[in-house]
């Protein structure tokens, strides 16, 4: 397939400039493999002369055997008053031995005079010599016109002259960069049309998110004739980020009808987004378009009811096209439709009367401080409890938690739990680092005798939120517990003025959910 638009991914270079991201060489190699498998056309690996990690990446990426993507090394045009043969930056770029070299140069006269501290004529020579040098060494050259749109506003004739210098030297594509991120979509379109009227070299676009228009600007550029789009997965990048390829790619392919990637590759987009977040050691952003877990979540009762009748009523696409899935969020704003859809997914026979009963229960509990929209595990357990034939895997009889200070030994915590499992009553005790830890350990100890598979179930996160701080230590607290079992992960909730009771509610729901699903398997 010959694409209408080529995707140039700069997650490994521009994306790494986001605060809080620091990729290792191994991280970058893993990401390059995933990006290649997804089908992007170019992967910008970094600036080989800027740090040892990037140099090591370019050496090791040669042995990966990438099947689709071309690796690009990134760097600046030569220094002023220097010839290419004597410029260490250009020599380092050549030494990276990548098939593609991306050179950035100045398009804005202010940058030339105030940052490079050279003349406008010398800057044109620097661009021309750098591009010609790389072409003479057989490289494909992507020319990034830094600050192009600022330069075009300030001095359009000179901004165009910088592009002409790169084009006449043989640049394969001229990428117009909105480096400061302040250009608006109609300004992008006007500038690109003006460039295309002057030059025949293919045009690319590189945008930043500072004015909230990065994705819109990239799409406007394609509409005006750009055939090369740069961006990052999840929009990671300097300041507030780069154009998000997780939005741009489906927008181009599904909304604008442009050939970008094979259709089956697009179904891996959500997986790729979450993989990159994991490697970057950042939580996946739930509210990202297309790939976020909330992208196809429906909370309002009217929405959920309409979705049961026709999924197109409140969704722009079938989420499966980008590897995502529809979710029905349960909360006090839900209607019966939310609960009926959820029960269908669980394979439960839930009547309208049962859904109404549960909806009233949810509204009452949320008035007490519970929140179920992030605790689907608790919702699923509640739905099972409504089934007439349901028998809970365990039932609490008593628990006691003791916290004491003993001189010379510090704080000690013990918990005792008595539970009924079928006809059997199990009574256990355990110590812990704190009251919740002791209670969790004692409950698991009791249940392990009957359910040994619980050894595979692990607490993944424990969050406490004070709902009304003005009431001090009498405030209601909400406890949210995340639990995982291999690849599965679920969340449960509890709320009470007593943190131990709130924790127990969330904890017992979590283990009951685990046992329900262990029994299914």
Image: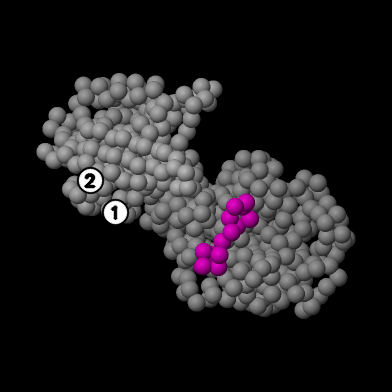
Q: Looking at the picture, how far across and down is residue 262, in whole percent?
A: 41, 58
* Magenta stretch encompasses residue 26: yes
Local secondary structure at mark 1: helix
* Magenta stretch encompasses residue 25: yes
Q: Nearer the viewer, mark 2 or mark 1?
A: 2
Residue situated furthest front in the rendering = 407
Number of residues whose C-alpha sits closer than 10 Å to that of mark 2, classed few (under 14), some (14–19) or many (20 or more): many
The residue at which mark 2 appears reads as 447
Q: Is residue 8 above or below residue 291?
A: below
Does the image show residue 2?
Answer: no
Q: Looking at the picture, how far across and down is residue 393, in whole percent?
A: 19, 40
Q: Which residues are magenta?
A: 16-29
| Residue at 41%, 44% in the rendered image | 412
Marks 2 and 1, how far apart at CA: 13 Å
Q: Is residue 383 above or below residue 433?
A: above
Does the image show residue 153?
Answer: yes
| Residue at 49%, 58% in the rendered image | 279
Q: Looking at the picture, how far across and down is residue 255, in whole percent?
A: 47, 44
Checking the image for residue 41, the label placed there is none
The residue at which mark 1 appears reads as 456
Which sits in the foreground, 418 or 238?
418
Q: Is residue 397 above or below residue 443?
A: above
Local secondary structure at mark 2: helix
| Residue at 50%, 62% in the rendered image | 31
Indicate left or right for 433 with 159 as reference.
left
Q: State the image quarter where residue 349 is shown.
A: top left
Q: Looking at the picture, how far across and down is residue 28, in whole percent?
A: 53, 65
């Amino acid at each position: 397939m010959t694409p209408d638009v080529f995707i140039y991914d700069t997650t490994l270079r521009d994306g790494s400039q986001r605060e809080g991201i620091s990729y290792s060489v191994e991280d970058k190699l893993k990401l390059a493999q995933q990006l290649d498998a997804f089908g992007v056309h170019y992967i910008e690996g970094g600036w080989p002369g800027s740090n040892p990690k990037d140099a090591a990446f370019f050496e090791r990426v040669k042995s990966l055997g990438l099947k689709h993507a071309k690796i690009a090394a990134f760097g600046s045009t030569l220094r002023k008053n220097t010839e290419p043969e004597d410029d260490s930056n250009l020599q380092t770029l050549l030494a990276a031995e990548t098939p593609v070299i991306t050179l950035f140069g100045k398009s804005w006269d202010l940058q030339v005079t105030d940052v490079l501290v050279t003349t406008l004529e010398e800057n044109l020579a620097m661009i021309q010599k750098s591009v010609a040098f790389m072409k003479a060494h057989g490289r494909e050259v992507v020319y990034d016109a830094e600050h192009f749109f600022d330069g075009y506003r300030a001095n359009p004739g000179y901004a165009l002259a910088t592009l002409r210098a790169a084009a006449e030297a043989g640049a394969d594509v001229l990428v117009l960069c909105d480096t400061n991120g302040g250009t608006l979509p109609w300004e992008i379109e006007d500038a690109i049309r003006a460039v295309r009227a002057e030059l025949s070299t293919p045009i690319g676009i590189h945008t930043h998110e500072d004015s909230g228009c990065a994705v819109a600007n990239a799409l406007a550029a394609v509409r005006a004739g750009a055939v090369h789009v740069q961006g990052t997965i999840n929009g990671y990048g300097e300041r507030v980020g780069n154009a998000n390829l997780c939005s741009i790619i489906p927008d181009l392919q599904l909304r604008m009808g442009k050939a970008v990637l094979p259709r089956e590759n697009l179904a891996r987009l959500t997986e790729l987004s979450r993989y990159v977040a994991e490697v970057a050691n950042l939580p996946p952003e739930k509210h990202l378009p297309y790939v976020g877990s909330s992208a196809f979540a429906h909370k309002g009762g009217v929405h959920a009811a309409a979705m049961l009748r026709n999924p197109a009523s409140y969704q722009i696409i079938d989420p499966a096209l980008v590897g995502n899935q529809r979710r029905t969020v349960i909360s006090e704003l839900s209607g019966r439709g939310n609960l009926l859809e959820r029960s269908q997914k669980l394979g439960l026979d839930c009547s309208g009367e049962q859904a109404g009963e549960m909806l009233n229960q949810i509204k009452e509990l949320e008035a007490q401080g519970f929140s179920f929209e992030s605790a689907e595990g608790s919702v699923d357990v509640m739905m099972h409890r409504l089934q007439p034939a349901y028998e809970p895997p365990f039932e609490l009889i008593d628990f006691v938690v003791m916290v004491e200070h003993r001189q010379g030994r510090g704080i000690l915590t013990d918990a005792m739990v008595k539970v009924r499992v079928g006809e059997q009553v199990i009574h256990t005790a355990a110590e812990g680092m704190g009251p919740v830890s002791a209670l969790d350990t004692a409950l698991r100890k009791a249940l392990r005798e009957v359910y040994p598979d619980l050894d595979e179930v692990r607490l993944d996160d424990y969050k406490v939120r004070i709902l009304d701080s003005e009431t001090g230590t009498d405030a209601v607290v909400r406890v949210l517990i995340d639990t995982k079992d291999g690849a599965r992960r679920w969340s449960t909730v509890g709320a009470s003025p007593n943190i131990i009771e709130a924790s127990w509610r969330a904890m017992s729901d979590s283990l009951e959910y685990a046992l329900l699903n262990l029994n299914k398997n």
